[in-house]
């Protein structure tokens, strides 16, 4: 395992790589869990070199406290990556952990990357500047690492749409691979943020997936039902649990645009506050 902590050293390493080797990248903000390790193992099965980046990206947080309290533990992440490697795996693992100062030496006057329309989606409006922050850091990581394949998790559904558009519209010669959402035994989507939940909040949180599944059942029983009716049903379900504060429920197509009716399939997603922790989740609604 190679650990690189600055951009200059990464460029040096990148130059030393034999041209026909396949490079995968798994961008993360650290505090790794099974879903990240599953992306890393998928990358290991397809690439000669897998770069896992760990960088808590300040410019994608629209809430200072959320940024300052984001869980971080790089030594433990490195251990997890090492332990997750199958014994017969020949892939080279690289960890890239640049500092904020190096990534953003001029944070208030820097070039940013904005993917048109995403900031106007319901998810974008609920977190102003978030998706521009994601697009900017992912562009920088793509430019530094120059991978052949990049791996992201479906839990961040709009982020996946954004990154596919970014790669396509900015001509990055990179395949984007999306890994399925991984869930805890009780249905809660795996997330680094789950570690911020108190015991009581953790016990409460599987309710999010339960509501999404109830909306899915209603849709499957009434495939002609409008998105508005499905969302109203979901809001009423969430309101049964007064310890949660719902931020939004949305039903959108695979371009991230909200749809009135589901003609084939759509993404049902939501963001909910459990105490101070904002959790997101989504499932695909599909006509039988
Ligand atoms: O999904 C995440 O962890 C982050 O949004 C990402 C893609 C690493 C960019 O900071």
Image (spheres, rainbow, N blue to C red):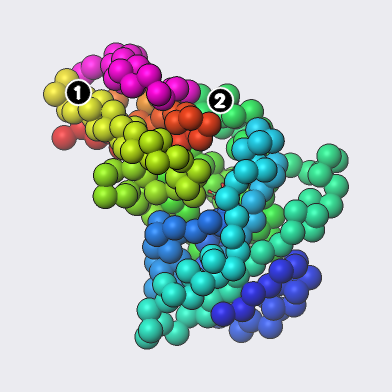
Q: Residue furthest front?
A: 199
Which residue is under mark 2? 126
Q: Which residues are magenta?
A: 223-247
Q: Residue at x 40, y 41 (%)?
A: 199
Q: Is residue 236 left or right of residue 89?
A: left
Task: Choose the circle earlier in sequence order: 1 or 2.
Answer: 2
The relative height of residue 184 versus residue 207 in the rendered view (above or below) is below
Residue 78 horizontal/vertical position (percent): 55, 70
Task: Count neighbours of disc 2 (C-alpha within 10 A) and say few if under 14, some if 14 to 19, many if 20 or more.
Answer: some
Is residue 259 rendered magenta in the image?
Answer: no
At mark 1, the secondary structure is helix
Task: Give the position of the C terminus as an image quadrant.
Answer: top left
Residue 3 horizontal/vertical position (percent): 64, 74
Q: Is residue 23 visible?
A: no
Is residue 245 rendered magenta in the image?
Answer: yes
Q: Residue at x 61, y 78 (%)?
A: 2
Q: Quadrant of residue 207?
A: top left
State the separation of the CA atoms marked 1 and 2.
26 Å
At mark 2, the secondary structure is helix
Q: Residue at x 46, y 36 (%)?
A: 279
The relative height of residue 69 versus residue 79 in the rendered view (above or below) is above
Q: Which mark is residue 145?
A: none
Q: Is residue 165 left or right of residue 90?
A: right
């Amino acid at each position: 395992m190679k650990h690189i902590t600055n951009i200059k050293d990464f460029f040096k390493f990148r130059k030393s790589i034999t041209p026909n080797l396949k490079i995968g990248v798994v961008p993360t903000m650290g505090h790794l869990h099974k879903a990240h390790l599953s992306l890393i193992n998928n990358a290991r099965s397809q690439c000669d070199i897998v770069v896992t980046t760990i960088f808590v990206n300040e410019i994608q947080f629209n809430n200072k406290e959320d940024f300052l309290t984001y869980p971080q533990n790089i030594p433990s992440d490195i251990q997890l990556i090492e332990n997750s490697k199958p014994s017969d795996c020949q892939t080279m693992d690289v960890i890239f952990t640049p500092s904020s100062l190096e990534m953003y030496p001029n944070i208030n006057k820097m070039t940013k990357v904005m993917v048109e329309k995403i900031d106007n989606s319901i998810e974008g409006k609920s977190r102003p500047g978030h998706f521009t922050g994601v697009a900017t850091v992912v562009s920088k990581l793509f430019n530094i690492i120059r991978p052949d394949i990049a791996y992201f998790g479906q839990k961040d559904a709009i982020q996946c749409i954004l990154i596919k558009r970014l790669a396509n519209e900015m001509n990055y010669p990179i395949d984007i691979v999306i890994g399925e959402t991984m869930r805890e035994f009780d249905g809660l989507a795996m997330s680094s943020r789950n570690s911020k939940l108190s015991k009581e909040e953790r016990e409460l949180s599987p309710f999010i997936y339960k509501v999404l599944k109830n909306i899915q059942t209603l849709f499957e029983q009434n495939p002609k039902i409008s998105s508005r009716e499905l969302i109203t049903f979901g809001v009423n379900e969430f309101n049964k649990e007064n310890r949660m504060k719902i931020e939004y429920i949305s039903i959108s197509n695979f371009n991230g645009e909200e749809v009135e009716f589901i003609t084939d399939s759509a993404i049902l997603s939501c963001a909910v506050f459990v105490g101070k922790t904002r959790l997101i989740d989504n499932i695909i609604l599909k006509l039988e």
